[in-house]
Image (tube, rainbow, N blue to C red):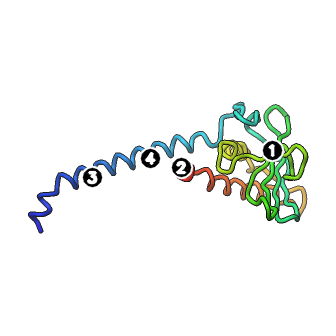
Amino acid sequence: MIMLFEKYKKIINYGATSLLALVLLLSIFILIEKEGETGQPGEVTEMFEVRLPVEVMFADVFMDGRTKFVLVKDGKEDFFEFCLDGRREERGYFYINAIHPSDENAQKITYKGKGERELLKILNSWDSSDWEPRNEYDDTKEIAKGLIEKLEKRTRWWELF
């Protein structure tokens, strides 16, 4: 057994070194990806032209199958709206420029695509620490946080390939 180990020692060392290099490279890639998720103050998102940071004005849920929508105000005082379709036939797609997918101006964005990464950046730029609900039924913060979690799951780099 020891003779066998000695014979393949170089191969084992080479494999371990390669594995360590791969782990280091992936760690750097993850750090680079994480750094860009929140955006910088004053940054304008590429696809949607939303100036960061944003303030989430309101978020709610329709009773059509749980479609969620968010209305944000950006750093230019412009409003931007988007929604996550909860209807049975199109469940799971995000739409921009609308609070509901059936709105006339609704534009579907690519599932797990660049648009979803930008929505994540937009939501992550919101400082919700001083958010105060308007009433006991206001679930804006919880809805926004839930959408952040959903987008984070979808936009992990290893799921993009």
Q: Which amino acid does label 1 sit on?
A: Gln
Q: What element carries label 1?
A: strand
Quick one: label 4, few (<14), some, or many (20+) residues within 10 Å?
Answer: some
Q: Nearer the viewer, mark 1 or mark 3?
A: 1
> How far separated are the C-alphas under marks 4 and 1?
34 Å
Earlier sequence position, callout 1 versus callout 3:
3
Q: Which mark is residue 26?
A: 4
Q: What residue type is labelled 4?
A: Leu
Q: Which residue is drawn at 48% across and 43% down?
A: 29
Q: Which of marks 2 and 3 is in front?
A: 2
Residue under label 1, please give it. 107
Residue under label 3, please give it. 15
Quick one: label 2, few (<14), some, or many (20+) residues within 10 Å?
Answer: few
Q: Residue furthest front?
A: 89
Quick one: label 1, few (<14), some, or many (20+) residues within 10 Å?
Answer: some
Q: Which amino acid does label 2 sit on?
A: Phe
Q: What element carries label 3?
A: helix
Q: Nearer the viewer, residue 77 or 127?
A: 77
Q: Which mark is residue 161?
A: 2
